[in-house]
Image (cartoon, helix red, strand yellow):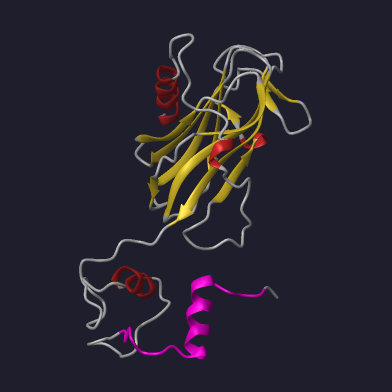
Amino acid sequence: MFRLGLVVLTLSVIAFPAGAQKTIHDPTHIALPTSTSPEAFGTGSYETTGVNAWSFDPVDSATPYTDDFTSWRYFTGPGRPFFLAGVNVPAGVTIDFIGLTYCDSSFNGFDLSLYDITDGGADALVAQIFPPNNTCGTAYNALPVNYQWNSNRQHTLEFILFQGPDFNGALKFRAAEVRYKRKISPAPATATFADVPSPHLFYQFIEALAASGITAGCTAPPNPNYCPDAPLTRGQMAVFLSRALGLHWPD
């Protein structure tokens, strides 16, 4: 039911006047990496989750589409030319960019939108791009959208891709992606440790360690302390790092 509403919403969004200036373009000037290895950690670098074209389905199965057997997909006739695909992004991140790998040899084009959809059917637009015409490559939104993706519970992310009125292979796409940065959760209102009150310089970061189970502090409840100025042994460092990174080895 919500998908039909999204299609109607998307149709209203993309109805811009002919010749209107498109604010989204090839972002070569923002110098983003093309990919990030799965081993990337931290809040300073971008990570990428991609969805290939074969994971996109038409919103209406009666609208004809095809693949050209080299990972490209496109509609081959009129109807309701919308493709849909879900995308999985870890919770606790800031979504900044979406991208589309495509080829456009026409004067028409694509419209790619990413929506945050709740179990109740409500939706919020996360980002939208109109890739440039007459080019092939990967296009992104020019500026970060700073969308806070805090929980996967009762929320899903879904791409909606509209194809302009060319159905002869002049418009085709290969993949879509989401780029995000990890973030540290906000600190709670009540301090966990008596010796690290809320005004403390490292309050947010120490609370994050405690909430994630990396440390329980240096003294036991009912009056736990963290001992923020105590030296760290190599053994304690091993516990911190192993728990924080989830280090393990398969059998």
| 183 shown above or below 191 | above
Query: Could you tell whether 222 is left or right of 150 in the image?
Result: left
In the image, residue 118 lies at what x, y percent? Answer: 37, 41
Q: Within the magenta stretch, is there residue 228? A: yes
Residue 172 in sight: no
The region drawn magenta spans 226-249
Give 30 or 158, whichever is nearer the viewer: 30
| 129 shown above or below 225 | above
Report how many numbered discs are placed on residues in the image.
Answer: 0
In the image, residue 153 lies at what x, y percent? Answer: 40, 52
Q: Quadrant of the C terminus?
A: bottom right
In the image, residue 248 lies at what x, y percent? Answer: 61, 75
| 237 shown above or below 43 | below
Query: Could you tell whether 189 is left or right of 132 in the image?
Result: left
Q: Within the magenta stretch, is there residue 198? A: no
- Furthest-top residue in view? 18
Query: Could you tell whether 169 is left or right of 238 in the image?
Result: right
Query: Could you tell whether 209 is left or right of 178 in the image?
Result: left
In the image, residue 163 lies at what x, y percent? Answer: 58, 20
> Where, by quadrant of the figure, is residue 226 drawn?
bottom left
Give 137 or 61, whichever is nearer the viewer: 137
> Where, by quadrant of the figure, is residue 109 drawn?
top right
- Residue shown at 34%/35% (left/top)? 122
Residue 190 in sight: yes
- Furthest-right residue in view? 69
Q: Quadrant of the N terminus?
A: top left
- Residue shown at 34%/39% (left/top)? 120
